[in-house]
Image (cartoon, helix red, strand yellow):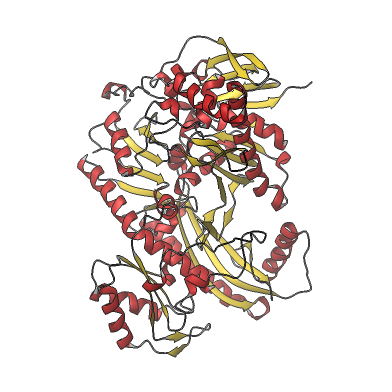
């Protein structure tokens, strides 16, 4: 794979007003917005060992000075990878006397009840680093046992010699009264300066001791690494003259200015994928599509989200590497199926694709960087869907012979021809995606036939039509510059702040004025944080959310709360939400209100994705014909550059539409039409 050409200042349309960078497992995508509103993009290999280096490489290609840049917007998978690879900081856990084993005991339920060899996920903090302090607060927030100063002294002595770099403090019922946790944090900050200390009343002020402890432990575990990484990146930007706002994407789908607020590491776990889903939602709305399944296939994974009425779905809890994370997040599901996913034969002799990935280094065999194992990208090259001379706008030339050798070795193991093996790899990657989409739709009572599939990422548009056909989705929408949509999503993401409180109380016992006062307090905290980030007061939009349950139920459902909060409406909304989720409700049963959340947003200017250009990209010639190899022989397809298509143009499959950061495959029996927003709209042809 040849190195990209240097991009010169002459390629720029002016000074950069905003820069958006999304670091993925294989590529780092950058979008540069000029003062005139034009968008330039760059795609460089990620550097997993030092992720900030890939940002430097992208900036070096575009500019040497950032003095006029007002905002740097950032999303990444650094936090997620640190947990999965267990590369966080040595961490201690501090809790109430008698509860040292919370992280070890976890929950009694199994994630897979049929797995006879089931083993609970290993906690991020080992038991020898779990410590207790003498104190006790009741669920009502009353001090039952005062915090003992001598237990703090003993704790500090143990931590000082333990070698830990971070501490997670989760005291019993601190969501109801944070006084003791705050005192522990203040004491440790004085006694052991330089130690990262997170407290659960700040990270996850909600009930359920294990989930709160797990989330706080993960935040502390990530704290030193994420803090160092962001500080180094900020310092590198400053060396280039940057003095603007440094903002990061949160898992909940909004941006936060790290210069004004403390960004908790657990809030960055889905920061890359959620940027793409948010960008897809905006693109679909502009095209008049409100019900969407997003399909983001990059180099390492595929990320899927459901969008109803133009808005992402949210979840109050997610899991990472088997560990619960109690933090608001966009409801995104990920599966290990990307362009770099490795194809292999399992112990039973069956073909499998992923979850292991070739990543950025060495990458797929066709990258020519030392990789030899077959990947999905290699399969596309062998089939002829990806042409080696057209990859990344023609700046990189792939090694077709290396891809052929990698797939040939797999074909020998399968007892198949090389084209048969390549097609099998692609189809299995399709099936992995289809199964993941079924989980987030059919298993939740949603019908994929009611949704448009929005495909993006470097590989998503290559698989989208077949995935949509299997699921029954009536249409596929492929945005322009689909391979850059996650970075683009950072440009259109709102400023966002969230506050949460827990008060477990039956609905019948709430006085309307008390409930409204609680929400108004949360409203004020959210507004203050957004104003601190530069949001105009009149542009702030607040969403109130209530989590409730039937008394005796173990888990809650979320409903929207009005302003002012009207208790009968909340009760009715809960019954309706329960019926939608479980196909039944019990309207005579009493309801318990549990958690109260306010999410505030300030919408941003919409950038035009269709105006994005890849500097030095080749527009290519007119439409050309070439063969695509399959298990049943060759198929002649039309290859054309996307830059040469205009609104109203149609292509009849088989066809491949190539652009600088992605390619779209239109199978036989499908047509692709360019709409007025430069999106490709794929649909089945009438028989």
**Left or right for 545, reference 104:** right
User: Would you identify the image quadrant in which residue 302 lies?
Assistant: top right
Depth check: 213 or 290 in front?
Answer: 213
- Give the residue displayed 43% in from the left and 70% down from the top: 200
User: Would you identify the image quadrant in which residue 475 lies?
Assistant: top right
Depth check: 541 or 243 in front?
Answer: 243
**Left or right for 633, reference 519:** right
- Give the residue displayed 48% in from the left and 31% down from the top: 483
Depth check: 585 or 319 in front?
Answer: 319
- In percent of width and height, residue 290 lies at 64, 41
User: Would you identify the image quadrant in which residue 14 lies?
Assistant: top left
**Left or right for 220, reference 450:** left
Query: Do we see residue 537 in this rendering?
Result: no
Relative to 327, residue 205 above or below: below
- In percent of width and height, residue 382 lies at 53, 21
Relative to 339, residue 330 above or below: below
Query: Do we see residue 494 in this rendering?
Result: yes
Which corner quadrant holds the N terminus? top left
- In percent of width and height, residue 307 lies at 61, 45
**Left or right for 509, reference 615:** right
- Give the residue displayed 49% in from the left and 71% down from the top: 104
- In percent of width and height, residue 143 lies at 45, 88
Depth check: 540 or 288 in front?
Answer: 288
């Amino acid at each position: 794979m040849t190195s990209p050409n240097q991009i010169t200042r002459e390629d720029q349309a002016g000074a950069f007003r905003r820069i958006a960078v999304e670091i993925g497992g294989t590529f780092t995508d950058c979008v540069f917005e000029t003062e005139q509103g034009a968008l330039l993009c760059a795609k460089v290999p990620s550097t997993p060992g030092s992720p900030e280096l890939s940002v430097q490489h992208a900036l070096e290609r575009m500019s040497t000075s950032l003095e006029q840049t007002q905002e740097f917007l950032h999303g990444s998978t650094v936090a997620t990878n640190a947990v999965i690879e267990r590369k966080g900081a040595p961490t201690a856990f501090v809790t109430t006397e008698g509860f040292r084993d919370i992280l070890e005991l976890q929950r009694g339920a199994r994630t897979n009840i049929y797995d006879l060899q089931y083993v609970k996920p290993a906690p991020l903090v080992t038991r020898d680093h779990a410590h207790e302090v003498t104190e006790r607060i009741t669920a009502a927030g009353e001090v039952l046992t005062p915090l003992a100063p001598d237990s703090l002294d003993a704790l500090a002595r143990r931590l000082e010699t333990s070698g830990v770099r971070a501490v997670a403090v989760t005291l019993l019922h601190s969501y109801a009264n944070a006084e003791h946790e705050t005192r522990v944090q203040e004491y440790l900050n004085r006694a052991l300066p330089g130690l990262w200390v997170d407290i659960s009343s700040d990270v996850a002020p909600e009930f359920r001791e294990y989930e709160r402890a797990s989330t706080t432990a993960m935040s502390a575990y990530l704290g030193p690494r994420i803090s160092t990484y962001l500080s180094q990146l900020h310092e590198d930007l400053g060396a280039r003259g940057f003095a603007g706002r440094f903002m990061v994407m949160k898992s909940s789908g909004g941006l936060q200015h790290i210069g004004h607020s403390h960004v908790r590491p657990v809030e960055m776990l889905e920061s890359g994928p959620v940027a793409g889903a948010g960008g897809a939602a905006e693109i679909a709305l502009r095209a008049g599509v409100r019900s969407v399944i997003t399909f983001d296939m990059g180099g390492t994974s595929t990320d899927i989200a459901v969008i109803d009425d133009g808005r992402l779905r949210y979840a109050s809890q997610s899991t990472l590497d088997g560990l619960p994370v109690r933090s608001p997040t966009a409801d995104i599901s990920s599966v290990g199926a990307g362009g770099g996913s490795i194809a292999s034969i399992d112990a039973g002799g069956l073909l499998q694709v992923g979850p292991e990935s070739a990543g950025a280094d060495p990458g797929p065999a066709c990258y020519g960087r030392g990789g030899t194992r077959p990947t999905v990208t290699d399969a596309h090259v062998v089939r002829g869907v990806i042409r080696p001379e057209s990859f990344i706008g023609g700046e990189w030339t792939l090694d077709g012979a290396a891809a052929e050798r990698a797939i040939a070795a797999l074909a020998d193991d399968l007892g198949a021809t090389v084209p048969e093996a390549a097609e099998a790899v692609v189809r299995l990657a399709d099936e992995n995606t289809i199964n993941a989409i079924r989980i987030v739709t059919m298993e939740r009572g949603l019908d994929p036939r009611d949704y448009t599939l929005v495909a993006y990422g470097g590989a998503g548009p290559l698989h989208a039509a077949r995935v949509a056909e299997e699921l029954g989705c009536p249409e596929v929408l492929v945005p322009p510059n689909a391979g850059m949509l996650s970075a683009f999503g950072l440009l259109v993401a709102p400023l966002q702040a969230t506050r949460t409180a827990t008060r477990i109380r039956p609905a019948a016992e709430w006085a309307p004025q008390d409930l409204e006062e609680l929400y108004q307090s949360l409203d004020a905290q959210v507004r203050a944080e957004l104003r601190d980030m530069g949001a105009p007061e009149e542009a702030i939009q607040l969403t109130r959310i209530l989590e409730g349950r039937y008394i005796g139920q173990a888990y809650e459902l979320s409903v929207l709360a009005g302003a002012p909060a009207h208790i009968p409406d909340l009760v009715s909304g809960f019954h309706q939400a329960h019926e939608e989720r479980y196909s039944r409700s019990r309207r005579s049963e009493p309801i318990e209100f549990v958690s109260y959340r306010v999410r505030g947003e300030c919408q941003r200017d919409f950038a035009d994705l269709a105006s994005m250009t890849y500097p030095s990209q080749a527009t290519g010639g007119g439409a050309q014909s070439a063969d695509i190899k399959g298990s049943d022989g060759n198929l002649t397809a039309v290859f054309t550059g996307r830059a040469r298509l205009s609104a109203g143009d149609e292509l009849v499959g088989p066809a491949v539409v190539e652009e600088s950061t992605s390619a779209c495959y239109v199978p036989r029996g499908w047509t692709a039409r360019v709409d007025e927003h430069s999106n490709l709209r794929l649909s089945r042809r009438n028989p």
